[in-house]
Amino acid sequence: MNVGMDIVKPLIADTDMPTLGTIVIGTVKGDLHDIGKNLVVMMLESAGFKIVDVGVDASPEDFVAAAVDNNADIVAMSAMLTTTMQMMDKVVAACKDAGVDVPYLIGGALVSTIFSEKIGAVYAADVSAAVENAKELVS
């Protein structure tokens, strides 16, 4: 997967596309799953977003620092475990405490619309939804 992305990414970067906005994205603290996040990153980049990937096992402070340093338009998070989903709420709270007033986009196998509404985020059920939701959030 990563080898394929390494081949495709330069081809996307060579295109002259306007930037739709900056998205800070990562897999939350305690979670090391990144295949879905990496697919979302690739599709968001191809749609015209600048991506700041904080990687896996990212703490709320990692998200805050990246959002502040890069003037993020959206903070996006992934979690694949029930034990790490609650970290999404902590990321949202930390960002808000730091004055990062942006929309939050979340996804992952166990995440739902109900959960996203509870923490004040937008839910993306799949890669296509993540791209469409991101476009709506910056328009």
Image (cartoon, grey):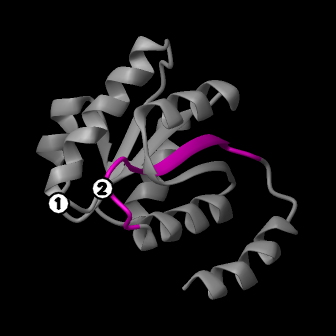
Q: Quadrant of the C terminus?
A: top right
**CB contact under 8 Å: marks 1 and 2:** yes
Q: Is residue 1 left or right of residue 124?
A: right
Please check the rendered image and state whether residue 24 is part of the magenta-colored stretch, yes or no.
yes
- The kind of residue on which mark 1 rests is Leu
Residue topped by disc 1: 110
Please state if 26 lies on the left or on the right of 24 as rendered.
Answer: left
Residue 61 place in picture, x, y as percent: 48, 30
Q: Is residue 139 visible?
A: no
Residue 8, given in percent of the width and then of the height, sits at 72, 81
Give the crowd class for mark 1: few <14, some 14-19, many >=20 residues within 10 Å: few
Q: On the image, numbered disc 2 is attached to which residue?
A: 79
Rendered-image quadrant of the N terminus: bottom right
The image position of residue 107, as x and y in percent, is: 32, 55
- Tell me which numbered mark, 1 or 2, is placed earlier along the sequence: 2
* Residue segment shown in magenta: 19-33
Q: Nearer the viewer, residue 114 or 89?
A: 89
Residue in view at x 29 percent, y 30 percent:
90
Q: SS of the residue at dot 2? A: loop
Question: Is residue 49 left or right of 74 when viewed as pictured?
Answer: right
Amino acid identity at mark 2? Ala
Is residue 39 depicted above or below 88 in this figure?
below
> Image point 51% across, 48% down: which residue?
25
Q: Is 37 above or below relative to 86?
A: below
